[in-house]
Amino acid sequence: MKHQADIRNFCIIAHIDHGKSTLADRMLELTDTVQKQKMQQQLLDQMDLERERGITIKLQPVSMYWHGYELNLIDTPGHVDFSYEVARSLAAAEGAILVADATQGIEAQTLANVYLAIEAELEIIPVVNKIDLPAAQPDAVAGELANLLGGSAEDVLRISAKTGEGVDQVLNGLITHVPAPTGHDDTSLRGLIFDSIYDEYRGVILYVRIIDGVLTSGSGVVLLGSGKHSEATEIGAFYPQPVAVDALYTGQIGYVVTRYKSVRQAQVGDTLTTAAAPATEALPGYKTVKPFVFAGFYPASGEQYQQLKDALERLQLNDAALQFSPENSKILGFGFRIGFLGLL
């Protein structure tokens, strides 16, 4: 069990292609979480599309250890379509590393996410990345960050995530500036669900931040928002691969394997508690994710209608934002109106 005062939960805020995943890679390497010979680029980006296009879509948490402290990173999406995923990550952290490209400065989407972090009262550590590039202007970009956050340009860290220069200063800054999580082990469990995935063999796996209490493996659990009951058949942490543990304590981040059959049964932002001694008050900010982009999809032939429906239902198991309803066109025939979180 890690002492609560020695835990730091943080996320990384950056625009697409400003080096967020590369910084996460260097952190994993520097903290010996992943051995250097086993490192691969964008290690926390697990999906094929993420590696193909160099963007982060699905959150991949990881726990690291640095100078006796447990550092829990929630890697956040930098693409404009995933601001909701950024917001859920911020709710599980006390601090944020704000990364800006030394050749491009602060982007509009970065500003939007910074305002979310400020609203969530996170401690923000400003970082200028890619100082190794010939076109880099680290002092100018540091000035932009200082003006944005109201600090001094001298306090802005200057790093190269690619070469590893200055990354140790970022890790030290997390320990120094980000506060330890609050909460109490000796009270009813309240865990914030900040993401979930569906495994066809194990059911829904929740990614949780323990706000209060202790969660032990085998406990009966209930979601305060939906009232759905289940069992924590396995709990664990990310190193960065999932590793089963006996318990998760206040302030820690981990996963919970449940018997839920769809991620729609366990919505992001809901509060996880124990069935035996449930919490009486849910965590604030629970929202149902809603799609923003809609399109009509029609199979090439009527025989493929059921196949398309089956495929959408399987996709919906892993994406709570996806919504679809039957639609009929005089020209195109039977199809579906599908709602997505955004374009990609």
Image (cartoon, grey):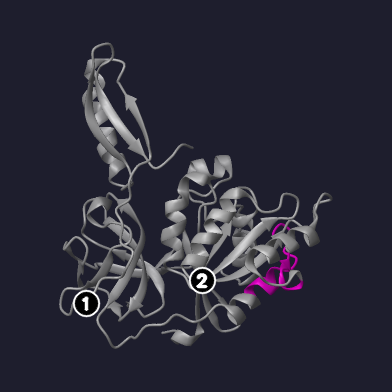
Q: Name the kind of residue labelled 2 in the image.
A: Leu
Q: Secondary structure at mark 1?
A: loop
Residue at image location 35% in from the left, 74% down from the top: 210
Query: Is 98 part of what is drawn in magenta?
Result: no
Percent of width and height locating residue 309? 24, 31
In the rendered structure, find residue 176 and report the number of the disc placed on it: none
Crowding at mark 1 (Cα within 10 Å: few <14, some 14-19, many 20+): many
Q: Which residue, as the protein is rendered here, is positioned at the far right?
A: 134
Q: Amino acid at mark 1?
A: Ala
**At x 44% / y 58%, what residue is drawn?**
87
Which residue: 26% across, 71% down?
282
Left/right of residue 152 with respect to residue 227 in the rendered view = right
Which of discs 1 and 2 lies nearer the camera? The answer is: 2
Question: Secondary structure beneath disc 2?
Answer: loop
Q: Quadrant of residue 299?
A: top left
Residue 164 in magenta stretch: yes
Residue annotated with mark 2: 122
Q: Which of the two residues, 167 or 38, is positioned nearer the viewer here?
A: 167
Q: Residues within 10 Å of mark 2 (few under 14, many from 20)?
A: many
Q: Position of residue 216 (x, y in %)?
A: 27, 77
Image location (x, y in percent) of residue 199: 31, 52
Residues in magenta, as a range = 154-171
Residue 30 appears left or right of 270: right
Position in image of residue 206 (x %, y %): 32, 61
Q: Foreground residue, 177 or 118?
A: 118
Q: CA distance from mark 1 to mark 2?
A: 25 Å
In the image: residue 185, left or right of residue 101: left
| Badge 1 vs badge 2, beta-carbon distance below 8 Å | no
The residue labelled by disc 1 is 279
